[in-house]
Image (spheres, rainbow, N blue to C red):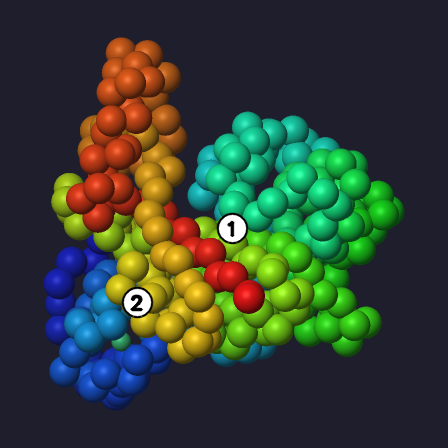
């Protein structure tokens, strides 16, 4: 059982607490529709809405700034482990780095910035530092922001200056960067425009800001329409789920040179596993049957038809 509540009317009290306008584009309430009534990690009060004007999906009621800070400082790492099904694995910095090595290589292959000479690099939401420590070892000058205190001491002891927030970093010195990146962070941030603009302010001339985040046009939601996935996906940690349209709407406000793209993170075996069992995780038997060529073709078709699961953005400072 997914625990899905199913369609029901809002009570009078709940109706009073409904969003008056879209918190991103300020479209009126007539443009707002319920996307999901089930929000993992939230309470009965939480729902996810979709804006018919800018397309963004958003958590309602919004998290207060205090709740947002507390969630990332105290609960986020453990919450995400429980969702990944890795809660039985050790949450030490070294173990986290080791199990993310394949992911690191995959991401490095996509970074568009030229790293052939030493650069100043900042990652926001660096977790165990699995992206940055190897860059630092290659001679780049790296700094990090990580709101969860879990790995910060380890990273500082390894000579990677790690701050709790971008505000703390800015307050501690006059820094600028050639490359700033973050992966699956923007959807967690209450003020995404302020977040991106602050980082643009930290870019040196010629620098790039690159990031990835979930895409709400994910085939599991919009093509297969899997309720099991919907009930898993719109979680309390995600304050927004963007689409190419809503992300472009947001980033256009920066007035910068912006490239928004799509990529497909999960493969066919993962999708079939969702359809069959209603839960995350791969299926090595199916993956072996499909093979790499079919899997690549499937991912490409999802990207080409706009049903990919991940948004990418590159912002260049001239
Ligand atoms: Zn909107």
Residue labelled with disc 2 = 246
Q: Specify whether tag 1 is near ligand 1 (CB below 8 Å).
A: no
Q: Can you give x and y, in whole percent of width and height, for residue 80 in the image?
A: 51, 47
Instruction: Using the image as rendered, state which of residue 218 and residue 246 is in the foreground.
Output: 246
| x 32%, y 30%: residue | 267
Residue 164 higher or lower than 142, as above or below = below
Please state, as top left, top right, bottom left or bottom right, where the C terminus lies in the image: bottom right
| x 33%, y 39%: residue | 264
Instruction: Using the image as rendered, state which of residue 235 and residue 261 is in the foreground.
Output: 261
| x 20%, y 75%: residue | 53
Instruction: Return the disc, 1 or 2, that comes first in the chain's sequence.
Output: 1
The label shown at residue 183 is 1
State the SS at label 1: strand
The quadrant holding residue 229 is top left
The label shown at residue 86 is none
Residue 121 higher or lower than 36, as above or below = above
| x 71%, y 36%: residue | 134
Residue 67 higher or lower than 108, as above or below = below
Residue 75 higher or lower than 98, as above or below = below
Q: Can you give x and y, in whole percent of width and height, for residue 87 in the image?
A: 55, 37
In three-dimensional space, the C-alpha distance between marks 1 and 2, rounded to whole angstroms, equals 18 Å
Q: Residues within 10 Å of mark 1 (few under 14, many from 20)?
A: some
Q: Can you give x and y, in whole percent of width and height, for residue 125 in the image?
A: 61, 55
State the SS at label 2: helix
Q: Specify whether tag 2 is near ligand 1 (CB below 8 Å).
A: yes
Residue 213 seen anywhere in this rendered image of the structure: no
């Amino acid at each position: 059982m997914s625990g899905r509540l199913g369609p029901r009317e809002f009570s009078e009290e709940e109706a009073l607490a409904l969003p008056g306008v879209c918190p991103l584009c300020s479209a009126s309430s007539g443009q707002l529709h319920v996307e999901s009534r089930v929000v993992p990690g939230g309470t009965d009060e939480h729902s996810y809405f979709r804006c018919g004007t800018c397309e963004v999906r958003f958590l309602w009621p919004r998290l207060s700034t205090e709740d947002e800070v507390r969630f990332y400082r105290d609960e986020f790492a453990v919450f995400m482990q429980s969702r990944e099904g890795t809660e039985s694995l050790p949450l030490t910095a070294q173990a986290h780095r080791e199990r993310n090595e394949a992911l690191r290589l995959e991401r490095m292959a996509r970074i568009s910035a030229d790293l052939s000479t030493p650069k100043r690099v900042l990652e926001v939401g660096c977790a165990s530092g699995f992206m940055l420590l190897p860059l630092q070892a290659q001679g780049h000058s790296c700094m990090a922001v990580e709101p969860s205190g879990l790995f910060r001491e380890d990273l500082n002891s390894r000579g990677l200056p790690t701050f709790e927030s971008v505000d703390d970093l800015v307050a501690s010195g006059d820094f600028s960067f050639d490359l700033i990146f973050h992966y699956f962070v923007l959807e967690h941030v209450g003020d995404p425009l302020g977040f991106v603009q602050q980082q643009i302010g930290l870019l040196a001339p010629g620098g790039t800001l690159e990031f990835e985040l979930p895409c709400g046009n994910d085939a599991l939601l919009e093509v297969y329409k899997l309720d099991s996935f919907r009930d898993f996906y719109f979680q309390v940690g995600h304050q927004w789920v963007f689409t190419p349209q809503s992300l472009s709407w947001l980033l256009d406000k920066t007035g910068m040179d912006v490239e928004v793209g799509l990529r497909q993170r999960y493969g066919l075996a993962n999708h079939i596993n969702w359809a069959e069992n209603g839960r995350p995780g791969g299926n090595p038997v199916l993956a072996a049957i499909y093979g790499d060529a079919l899997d690549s073709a499937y991912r490409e078709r999802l990207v080409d038809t706009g049903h990919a699961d991940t948004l990418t953005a590159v912002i260049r400072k001239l």
